[in-house]
Image (cartoon, rainbow, N blue to C red):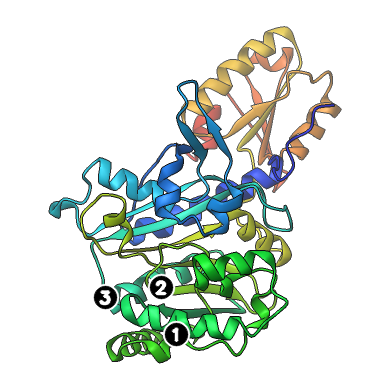
Amino acid sequence: MIQKPRGTQDLFLNNSKEWNAVEEKFRKVLNLFNYGEIITPMFESKELFVRGVGDSSDIVSKEMYEFTDRKGREYVLRPEGTAPTVRALIENKLYIQENLPYKTFYIGPIFRYERPQAGRYRQFNQLGVETFGIDSISHDVELISLGQSFLRELKINKDVIVEMNYLISGNERKEYELELKKYLNSFNDLCSDCEIRIKKNVLRVLDCKIDGNKFTEAPKMTLFASQENKERLNKTLDQIKQLGFEAKINFNLVRGLDYYTGLVFEFKNIKTDQAIIAGGSYNSLVEELGGPDLPASGFAIGIERIMMLLSDQEIKVADEDELDLFIIPLSDDAQFLTNKLLLEARTANLKVDTNWNIKNLKAGFKSAERMKSKNIVIIGENSINSDIYAIKDQNSGETKEMKFKDIVKYLKGEK
């Protein structure tokens, strides 16, 4: 038997319904915040991620699915969604002044070759929110408010805290990196990845999945930040708290992608210590990929992790799946009339169905019950000859008789 690749999953029945309902909730909130959707290819040039994400990141150094096409061009299945969005922004000149601020989102599959575990797959799905052309405390607060709105809409906003930090740049960052290297060199038992990162991009060490919890005494980046940056971080924190969100500063929060600058944040589940939403500012990325100097910020949500949280908390998002009518055909002539009624009802936006394999009434009623139909109609020789059809309301148990032409009107509540 051929099986699905390791690190992937199949979604069907109630799982796929819940999945679609979660996406609908996301889109509802994004519409309220006036974000429009962007759809980019599932594979891109390898260079895009090497330049955009950084070759010192785990994503680029060891997690990308790479392939070469017939002309020798190097491509990868997209391992994250921000760099493709920036590429599309630049290529299609979406940065023109009349489009700014440009507020967009994407929903789609992401591919990373990493060890599968609970809530983490090699093909997973991500909602990403990106904003271009705004750089202010007010916008940062609104962005975090958007993330909180998602969780509130799904009723999983309890036991969640927002952690944040401010990533400095320029000479301030160089001074901080020197102090951080001195601190890290005091360890003699770091993993091989950390040894490489100390040389290539020392901030990545703080994000290490193996040794990250050792660095409790690491020098704090804010000690090297300008007074302006310190005030910005503190004001952002204060405003978020004033909106009623649990929040704190995490001085070791650096995120796993090299393009972040300025504010970075994560929504964490206090009980599991897992990040639910993660993002921040990446004010240099547009220019680094060949576009104009344009501030940018955003965040991403792993939909699989959201589904896991909903399951753990026994929260159902999808509406109860019910039929307006189930039809039980009991003859060859009845099957033609059943198709006629199905067409008329569906044209009237009613959810109706039948089971063409039904052989008797007992099987028909079982099918109607399994599909949770509100009403049942039996089409047999007697009803066809008399043009009188009995519609049974499954909730009240009441049965009403009517002509064939009146069935759809009755279901719609029309007299």
Q: In which quarter of the image is residue 213?
A: bottom right
Tell me the crowding category of disc 3: few under 14, some 14 to 19, or many 20 or more residues within 10 angstroms, Cα based. few
| Precedes in sequence: disc 2 or disc 1 | 2
Q: Which of marks 3 and 2 is in front?
A: 3
- Residue 389 lies, with reference to residue 66, above or below; the image says above
- Residue 120 lies, with reference to residue 397, above or below; the image says below
Tell me the crowding category of disc 2: few under 14, some 14 to 19, or many 20 or more residues within 10 angstroms, Cα based. some
Q: In which quarter of the image is residue 140?
A: bottom left
- Residue 80 lies, with reference to residue 299, above or below; the image says above
The residues tagged by marks 3 and 2 sit, at their Cα atoms, a distance apart of: 14 Å
Q: Quadrant of residue 160?
A: bottom right
| Precedes in sequence: disc 3 or disc 2 | 3
Element type where label 2 sits in the image: helix
Residue 379 seen in render? yes
Q: In which quarter of the image is the N terminus?
A: top right
Residue type (three-letter) at the residue carrying disc 3: Ser
Q: Is residue 252 left or right of residue 187?
A: left
